[in-house]
Structures are given as structure tokens and as C-alpha cells.
Amino acid sequence: ATVMLDGTFVYPIRGRLEQELQDGEDYSLVRSNDVYGNFTQWDLLEYFETESARRNGNAVPVRSCFGGLTLYRASVWFQDSCQYTVDNPKSNTTAHLQRYATKASERPCEHVVLHECLFDSKSTTNEVRIGVQPRLKTEWNSDTVFENKLYPGTRHESLGIYKKHVEQGDALTNGDYRLRINEQGVLVVE
């Protein structure tokens, strides 16, 4: 659920809760309704790679994204005004974000809600910077970890999945750096 700086939701229109292009969206960056369409997930990755190259390898700024790795300052993560949750997707605080809701979940992703809140509440001393770094790739080992579940259901399951990732040596890498969680639970940059 990537949202570009101009508000373009790259999710296919057919899969959105509101199945129409919204004001200000760049249709050329909205993924096609099928995998063989005019603008696919691979085309989006190519777009980010091209834009990153234009920025000397730096991340491409966006309003919201998630996948691979996300780092937050503790002061941002623990502030009470913005939360990584959607308790009521039709509440006044998130109703304007319904344009980023998918038909399947009928709500925007939690990270979109958090990132929009951070943008709305930012001050000059707390600048929000969110970006896609296409050189950072998730490198999974061949063993299945999630057992056909996108998210674990309990804290116990989360710890079990974490343990499997540590045992397998899963890491995030961009060719220059490798990030992994070691046996003690510490994020290691190699």
C-alpha cells in the first residue's frame, strides 16, 4: 500500500474500496488491474529504481510505504497522538483516508494511518521523511516461515516466527549493507 507524495495510491483501482481515481492522483503510477497490464508491480519497482538513480542512489520520497524494513525514531513511535492502528476505519480521524482502503479489508493499512498522522502533525523540528530504497531487498531463505499466514495471530506465534527467522539467518540486504537480527535479538548491520 504505497502512497506517493502527491497522494497517488498505487493500488489497482479494481481492488480499492473507492474504485475511482481520486483528485490529484497520477494514473501512470497506479498499478494495472491485472498482472499483465500497462503498469505492473515490476514497473513500479523499475520506477523506484530509476528515481533512486536520479537521486544518486538515495531513497525515493513517498507519503507511505511498508515492506522489508521500516525504522522509526523512538520519539515518533511512542508519541500518543499517532498510532499504528485502525480501531475504527470510519471514525472522523481516519475517514479521509478511506481513499487508501482496499476492497478486501475495507480500511486503509495501519502504516498509512500512522504516516498520514505523522505528516499532519509534523513540525519544523520533527520533519517526517519516508521513502522507498529499491536497493534494499528482503532476502529470505527457502524454508517456509509464515506457514500460509500473512500475520501471526498471537504474540507467542510472533516469537516463534522471529525464532525461525533468526535460525534461518534471514536478512535485509542492499548489496552494500546487510541487516539481520542476531541470536540475542539485536539488529546487526554488517
Image (cartoon, rainbow, N blue to C red):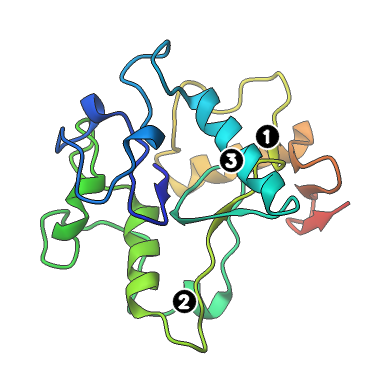
- Describe the element under mark 2 as helix, strand or loop: loop
Label located before the other in sequence (1 or 2): 2
Give the answer, above or below, for where 145 lies relative to 188: above
Residue nearer the viewer, 52 or 64: 52
Q: Mark 3: which amino acid?
A: Phe
Q: Between marks 1 and 2, how big is the CA–CA gap?
A: 28 Å
Q: Between marks 3 and 1, how big is the CA–CA gap?
A: 31 Å
Q: Residues within 10 Å of mark 2 (few under 14, many from 20)?
A: few
Across and down, in percent, residue 104 comes to 22, 30
Q: Mark 2: which amino acid?
A: Phe
Q: Residue at x 60, y 31 (%)?
A: 46
- Report the residue marked by disc 1: 164
- Report the residue marked by disc 2: 78
Across and down, in percent, residue 63 comes to 42, 58
Give the answer, above or below, for where 57 lies relative to 103: below
- Report the residue marked by disc 3: 48
In the picture provided, is 78 more to the left or to the right than 20? right
Q: Mark 1: which amino acid?
A: Lys
